[in-house]
Structure formats: C-alpha cells, structure tokens
Amino acid sequence: MSAVIFEHHNHIASITINRPEARNAMNPEVMVGLFDAFSEVENNPDIRVAVITGSGDKAFCAGADLGQLIPLMTHSRAPANEWDERYLNDVSKQGAYLMNKDTVKPVIAAINGHAIAGGMELVQGTDLRVAVPQAKFGLQEVKWAIFPAGGSTVKLPRQIPYAKAMELMLTGDLISAEEALALGFLNYVVAPDQLMAKSMELAEKLAANGPIAVQAIRKSARTVWGHPEIEALKMESTFSGPVFKTEDAVEGPKAFMEKRTPVYKGR
C-alpha cells in the first residue's frame, strides 16, 4: 500500500498520509508522495480544492521520521532506494510542507489526530482546518536540538499571536485542539465521526464557487500579507482585475439574475 493515497472526484482531491503504524510520520516516501500529490492538485485543471488527512485515529502527522529522514538529511546514512534519491535530488522535501510549493487551489486539513513538528508545519500550509477534539499541536524540534525548518518561524507568528507562537517554538510544548481553535489556528473542532463529513462539506462549498475567483482571492490574501496598506491595496488590484474579465464572471451574475445555479468552467 502506498504511503500517500491520492483520489480525485467531483473537482475535489483527497490526499491521505498512510503510515498509521508510524503515526503518519514523514519518511522519504511520504515526502515524495506529498510533493507529487500537491503537484497534481496544482496542475490538474479539473481539481478545484484538496482535502488532506492521515490514516488511523492517533495522528494526522507526527512530523519527520527521525529514524529515516533525519539521518538522510544530516548525511549520516546513504540513500537506500528511489524515495531516498528523489528526496535528496529534488524539491520534494520542501513541497511536502507546502513551504515552497504553491498548490494554487485551496487545501483543507482534516486533522484526525496529533499534528506535531512537521505535521503542524504541514497544517500551517493549508487554508482551512478541521480537527478532532483529541488532536494536539506543537513544534517539538527544539527539544531534539533541531530547527522547525518547514516554515514555522515565518508562518506561525502570522497565523497566531506572536507571543504564543514563540512559546510553542521555543518550549516545544503542545496545545489542545480547543486552544488551537481559540487562537484562530483552526476553523472547527468536531467529533471524530464528523471529521471527514465537515471537511468535505467545506470542500464542496469551495468547489461550487467560481474557481478563478477562489484562486485569485487565495493568492491575493497570501501575497499582500504583511505589506503596508496602500501598497497591499495596489497589489490586490493586480489579482482582482483579471477575474472580472473571465467567462465565469459573466456567468455568475447572469445565473443570479436568472435564479439558477451557475455553471462555472474555470475560464
């Protein structure tokens, strides 16, 4: 069975990290598999949104597989298979964290358990987040004298208050799903048997909207973040302008006036 399962139905991609016996920790096969899955989301015009989750009920992702990945990163072991080779020779190690990999389309995290270290960094790269009550979140790299190099020092202080972000990164402590929700890091906390239903409900809402508008709004929000207001407003216009020139922008208002469901074609 593949370490990453990819499916695609009705404009929605489903990605599952499939190493429940290892708490869905990221070994080279997972890293490469996620990179390939995110590349398919980016490049397949039929996909409008993706949902990512983990197998089992213990962990969404426990971060890097310390026995396989870290020795490869520190060159204390040689590559042993094609996954090791690809991990070392291409950008998959960064794309797996959604750090230097832009899917273009929104990604929803269906967090079925703990999201620790690289698992939490993967969550930080997503756009909407649904978690189960028992999930815990944290960046424990500092406890093992390593750096949370999946983008946390950049992303986390932008997504939750600065002082709390620094506490999590410098202590390595964990927080509960309820605290993550209160901090605004999550959108919803739901019972385990409702996790995928809620995540797919959100995905279906996004997939039903104008895909060009969805992608432009996402790109604008991510790009203008941190810029001075006047500069950011000018930047926003570069994303909004082209949307109004699309066929979908004609179809949406027309369908509204005709009291029917719009049919968007992504052009």
Image (cartoon, rainbow, N blue to C red):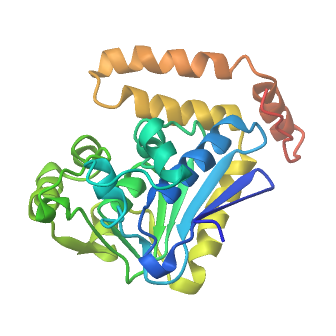
Residue 167, above or below 148: below
Q: Residue at 29%, 23% (x, y): give it.
A: 227
Which x, y percent locates residue 87? Answer: 46, 45
Q: Residue at 20%, 65% (x, y): give it.
A: 140
40 sits left or right of 53 in the view: right
Q: Quadrant of the N terminus?
A: bottom right
Q: Residue at 84%, 37% (x, y): give it.
A: 257
Marks counted in the figure total 0
Residue 180 lies in quadrant: bottom left
Residue 222 lies in quadrant: top left
Q: Quadrant of the C terminus?
A: top right
Residue 207, above or below 217: below
9 sits left or right of 89 in the view: right
Which x, y percent locates residue 34? Answer: 54, 52
Which x, y percent locates residue 24? Answer: 46, 71
Residue 185 visible from this viewpoint: no
Q: Nearer the viewer, residue 31 or 219?
A: 31
Which x, y percent locates residue 29? Answer: 52, 57
Q: Nearer the viewer, residue 256 or 6?
A: 6
Q: Residue at 69%, 55% (x, y): give it.
A: 13
77 sits left or right of 216 in the view: left
Residue 187 visible from this viewpoint: yes
